Image (spheres, rainbow, N blue to C red):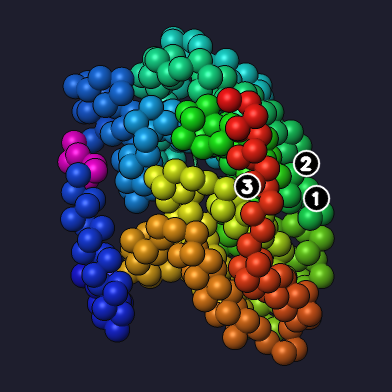
Amino acid sequence: MLKDLYQSALFPSEIKAMLKIKMEGQKFAPSKQSLEELALVTTDKEFCYSALNKVSRSFAMVIQQLPEDLKDAVCVFYLVLRALDTVEDDMKFPEDKKWPLLREFHKKSYDETFKLSGVGDQDDYTVLLENYPKVTRFFQSLHPSYQYVISDICYKMGNGMADFSEKKVHTIEDYDLYCYYVAGLVGIGLSGLFSASGAELAGLKDQTKLSNSMGLLLQKTNIIRDYCEDLHGDRVFWPSDVWKRYAEDLDFFHKNPHHPNSVACLNHLVTDALRHVPDALAYMSLLRNKKVFRFCAIPQVMAIATLAKVYNNPLVFTGNVKIRKGLAAKLMVETNTMDDVYEAFDQLSREILRKLPANDPNYHNTKAQLETIFATIEEPNNMIKDLLIKEEKVSV
Ligand code: IN0
């Protein structure tokens, strides 16, 4: 914390935001007890919220500010997705068992005896899977409309992950399809939960293209940022059709971080990720419930801030580049309305424009993509929102 305060010493608004988050965060502070100990003394619901607080600190806070019954559905959805991800990520899991399990995983939410021992690279994930019946019982206590959404997404995601066990990410289409399976479907599922809860318009669940783009923007940002970590973990998500234009081998960038081809490849992928910004802004402009809006908008402004930080930045090839804790806190505190989101996206897109090298091979694409983002912010299009409201009136 002190290190974070020091790094934000020149940004008083960030210091203020960090302290505000620290105060608010006390309510949700994960308990000092290990998840294993908690598993023995908590109800199914308490255990699930403790697990949520352990696996994703800042995001857990935002989930817990959602409207009541939606909060439980999103908590379960997050944990089911985390369980899927833990199985997919576990390189020690025997391959001949892993893929069939992923394809079957959606049925496990109806099998109270299902649990896994010794799976996962972090204790909390392993404990979550060992106590999976608690998640299953909490899932079964949800309204059937929430259960349907969660198990349908689980079915599609598990099969998509298993499909990609045999195929690599070569083309941009492969890249978009992989990100659809692991993140676009999360957006589509969340829209289903938001509509089912009544907190958002009934038609939101049908905005699959916009929901998908919300996921792709987050996932592509993570994939670009995690280049170094994934290279060392022998995981490859960067599309080979792109990086092969700039190097023979993917580890060339790690070995030659200051070579012009290295940041040229990085900038190419950031430009591709920016393609999803107009749809993401359109999606957020449809939301009417303030708590749902903040839940969706905060990760998006973090993502554009991360893209601005990694753009043209050779440090991506030698370590984990993250935005300052203070900036993250400021973005969390100051993201309340669509105008706040437009302001953040405008400022951070201008930061990328300032960094755009005149001799970058993708100079024109990147400039055009940024102009499109500025135009979207200048001229928000409420056509879809008006359509959904009209539909809502007719259907009532
Ligand atoms: C998420 C997403 C998420 C939130 C809100 C709306 C979304 C719409 C479409 C797709 C995903 C959406 O947000 C979380 C944010 C998160 O976990 N942040 C971490 C930091 C980090 O980098 O991991 C934190 O601790 O703050 C997210 O990244 N994902 C996610 C997972 C489940 C759910 Cl229900 C919502 C992961 C991913 C892969 C992007 C979908």
Residue receiving disc 2? 167
Point out which mark residue 385 bears.
Answer: 3
Residue 124 visible, this orientation:
no
User: Looking at the rendering, which quadrant does residue 65 occupy?
Assistant: top left
Query: Going 26% across and 65% down the picture, which residue do you hit?
Result: 18
Which quadrant of the rendered structure holds the C terminus? top right
Query: Going 35% across and 67% down the picture, which residue do you hit?
Result: 330
Which percent across, then down, holds residue 336? Answer: 40, 57
Question: What is the magenta range?
Answer: 28-33
Q: Nearer the viewer, mark 2 or mark 3?
A: 3
Disc 3 residue type (three-letter): Lys
- Label 1 or label 3, whichever comes before in sequence order: 1
- Label 2 or label 3, whichever comes before in sequence order: 2
Q: Nearer the viewer, residue 161 or 291?
A: 291
- Label 1 or label 2, whichever comes before in sequence order: 2
Query: Going 18% across and 55% down the picture, which residue do you hit?
Result: 23
